[in-house]
């Protein structure tokens, strides 16, 4: 049976940390489905379509990685595509508390679905989408944290802010 893992997230924007988890998951599973959530509790900078494009470009060379939009409960989505695993990345102990609670809830909702945690690589433990957006907004260099397409889009989004701020 094909082992499919779902890596869910808002990916607003996708970072090199996300891509590290996707690439490592690609080595462990027959297929990794990157599920792009339209999280109503978060205000996103980029549309689902833009985030999908960023992920398409950034994972172009990874075999067995697919991308799709996810709506509704994660556990329902996982079962609807025949996946058996939820893949999550952990950067710090603070991530673990939240992720552990989510994994326990998902296990209660469907005991047939496992959650697998991958520790962030040393080179990406400090990267978060929120920090990337904050740095970009203030005119900082985010090129070490995001793929090229995201860098260009962030610069375009925040260029008017940065230009008027320096005038």
Image (cartoon, rainbow, N blue to C red):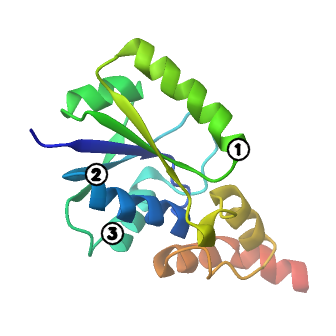
Q: Which mark is residue 131?
A: none
Q: Is 33 situated left or right of 58 in this image?
A: left
Marks 3 and 2 close (CB-CB < 8 Å):
no
Please give the residue where the numbered disc 1 appears in the rendered image: 93
Image height check: is 153 above or below 128?
below
**Residue 41 appearing in the image:** no
- Residue 101 is situated, as x and y percent measured from the top left of the image, at 59, 25
Q: Quadrant of the C terminus?
A: bottom right
| Residue toward you, 133 or 7 | 7
Q: Quadrant of residue 152?
A: bottom right
| Label 2 SS | strand
Residue at the far bottom: name it.
Answer: 167
The earlier-in-sequence mark between 3 and 2 is 2
Name the residue that disc number 3 marks. 59
The residue indicated by pointer 2 is 32
Local secondary structure at mark 3: loop
**How far, Cα to Cα, is label 3 from label 1?**
28 Å
Left or right of residue 62, residue 86 in this image = right
Residue at the (52%, 69%) spot, across then down: 16
Residue at (70% x, 44% y) in the render: 93
Q: Quadrant of residue 140?
A: bottom right
Q: Position of residue 32 (x, y in %)?
A: 28, 51
Q: Between disc 1 and disc 2, whose residue precedes?
A: 2
Please identify, in this view, whether the residue under mark 1 or under mark 2 is nearer the observer: 1
Mark 1 residue element:
helix
Q: Nearer the viewer, residue 41 or 118?
A: 118
Q: Is residue 3 left or right of residue 58?
A: left
Task: Identify the residue at horizontal 20%, vertical 60% (top origin).
Answer: 64
| Place of residue 96 in the rendered image (x, y in percent of width and height, measured from the top left) | 63, 39
């Amino acid at each position: 049976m094909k082992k499919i893992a779902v890596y869910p997230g808002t990916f607003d924007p996708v970072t090199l940390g996300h891509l590290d988890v996707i690439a490592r998951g690609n080595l462990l599973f027959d297929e990794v489905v990157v599920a792009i959530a339209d999280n109503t509790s978060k205000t996103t900078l980029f549309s689902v379509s833009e985030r999908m494009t960023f992920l398409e470009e950034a994972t172009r060379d990874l075999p067995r990685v697919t991308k799709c939009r996810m709506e509704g409960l994660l556990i329902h989505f996982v079962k609807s595509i025949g996946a058996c695993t939820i893949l999550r990345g952990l950067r710090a102990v603070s991530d673990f508390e939240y992720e552990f609670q989510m994994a326990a809830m998902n296990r209660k909702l469907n005991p047939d679905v496992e959650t697998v945690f991958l520790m962030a690589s040393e080179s990406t433990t400090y990267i978060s989408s929120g920090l990337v957006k904050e740095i970009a907004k203030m005119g900082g260099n985010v090129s070490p944290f995001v793929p090229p397409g995201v860098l260009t889009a962030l610069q375009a989004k925040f260029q008017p802010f940065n230009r008027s701020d320096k005038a």
